[in-house]
Amino acid sequence: MPLTMHSAPMWRRFAFASVASIALLPVISTLAIAQTATFAHSKHHNVEINFADPTTACAASTLRLTMQITPQSQEIDTLEQQLHLANALGSKLSTDSNCNNVQSVDLAVMQNGTQTHSLHATRSDNWKFVEAAPATNAAQEVPTQESTTTPSAAPIPQPEAPPPAIPDGYMGLLALLVQKNPALLGNEAVQTCWARHFFEQDYINARGNDFRQHEVANKAKLDLERISHQSASGQLRADLTLNLGQYDFNTSSFPVVLNGSVLSLSSNCDLSAAQLPNQVSFKLGEDNFSFPLPMPSAQAEQFLKQRTRYGYINRDMPVTLFFSVAEPELAKLNTPDFHIVPVELTSVKIYNDNARKELLGTIGSETLAGMRKAQADAQAAHLAKEAAQKRAENLRMMSERVQSANRSEKLAMWVGQDHNGYGLPSLDTMRSVRTSASLRNQPVPAILLVQTDSSGRKQVETKWPGKLTLTVPQDQPALSSGTWYIVQGQVSVPSKGDFPDATMAVQTLHACTQDQCKDAEDPQALATALQAQTTH
């Protein structure tokens, strides 16, 4: 069952409720800069970004700012959230003409008057903020003029900055496509699509005003360029709502079930002008996935009680899938053609709330690799069972029709139990086999009557039909010179040369005792051999 995700603007407002929303204040004049210390304001987080020195503002090459976090601020406690908010400044720093001279930014994170982190970004890195080298005290006050020196101390190792957030769904894919083909940045359809999703209000307000529309499109272009540079190559993310299954007392876990193996990401944008598909389908595996959510039984009982309202258990579980696309597969998406692209799940996060703040569990790459192996093993077992059933049916049919079969069919039945035809197998002619292999430019299956002209397993020449060499696998007997055989396998014909020798990779063979395999025509001997195969 395919899974479909749409990227309509109304849906984006819900799905990206946690995205930093910064309202940039216009710079009116030099006098206005001197009168205000505010550089930007986030309504979502209730956080102000202020000039450390309002008198210089954007005039210096290094802009110094402070992020003022107060008890009234929201969802800005962690370093990852602070970096995410800081990165949202990139658009203003890139487009504000008053900040053209700024080449780097130092941002001090202040929580209730105390500096907790120092962030740094440069224009050359597209204003991607990272944590600067730590001070000797993580809760050090902002230094004053009376305190300009600090005691020397060995540098404290710091964890790497968290990876940038991958846009959800189709927009994350669009950022990857731009990463691989930067020329898409100049495409009007791509700019419009990005603006509709991430600058929706600006896009709506700009309708009917060509100059404003150009400004919004350029803003979207710069933001898309920044995100595409930050995105990890081939990495995508999809937010879904899956079903919480019945508690399994044997494994002490809930199954969170993904019904279907094909995930479709779509957008309401018209990207035909950019030669991009509006919908892409990704093959996650061979079958449904059941992600385990471990939980002791006592805790599981309380968990279900908390999700019960008016006798109904809410089994909708917000889940985020992270998956990777191989480079060759990603290249195929630079066309409007429909593709089902195989991908590999790398991580799955299960949440308890729609805002995806309360993490319940994470399924890592090793667990997912084990699940994929189990799926592959089950698929192989299913195919083997089908092949065995088909072989048994072929043997039964051939046993019943031995007496009425012609010579070609009788000889082919010695090795053709696995044929996929609807009737009896029959011998092929070398002419038809060569023609088919040449036209298809690939190996073709065949059943042939041959006489060897040498012995061994590799490149054994033939007297009949000639211009054919045979290679035999280890599980089959070696060939003897001058012997007649009925062989079944794949025949290849080289594309170059003047009537070159064909080659057969033999899969099954039957050695005859008489010339032209006259002995293989005996219906009684053939029926006995087929009966033995049936009961084997």
Image (cartoon, rainbow, N blue to C red):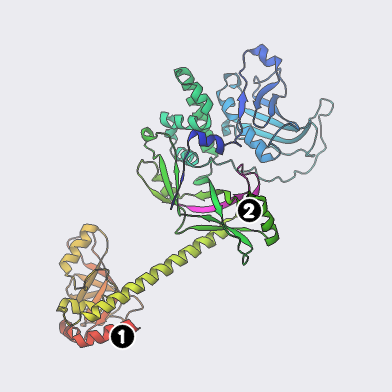
- Mark identifier at residue 361: 2
For this rendering, which residue is in front, 186 or 342?
342
Where is residue 104 shown, x and y percent of the image? 63, 29
Residue 222 in the image, given as x and y percentages of width and height: 51, 29
Q: Is residue 427 magenta?
A: no
Between 307 and 114, the one nearer to me in the picture: 307
Q: Which mark is residue 532?
A: 1
Span shown in magenta = 342-360
Count of picture labels:
2
**With respect to residue 494, does 517 lie above or below?**
below
Q: Is residue 359 visible?
A: yes
Seen in the image, is 248 located left or right of residue 465? right
Kind of residue sitting beneath label 1:
Ala
**Would you identify the image quadrant in which residue 533 lies?**
bottom left
- Vertical position of residue 225 compared to residue 23: above or below: below
Residue 358 sits inside the magenta stretch: yes
Residue at 52% x, 36% y: name it.
12
State the residue lying farthest toward the front.
310
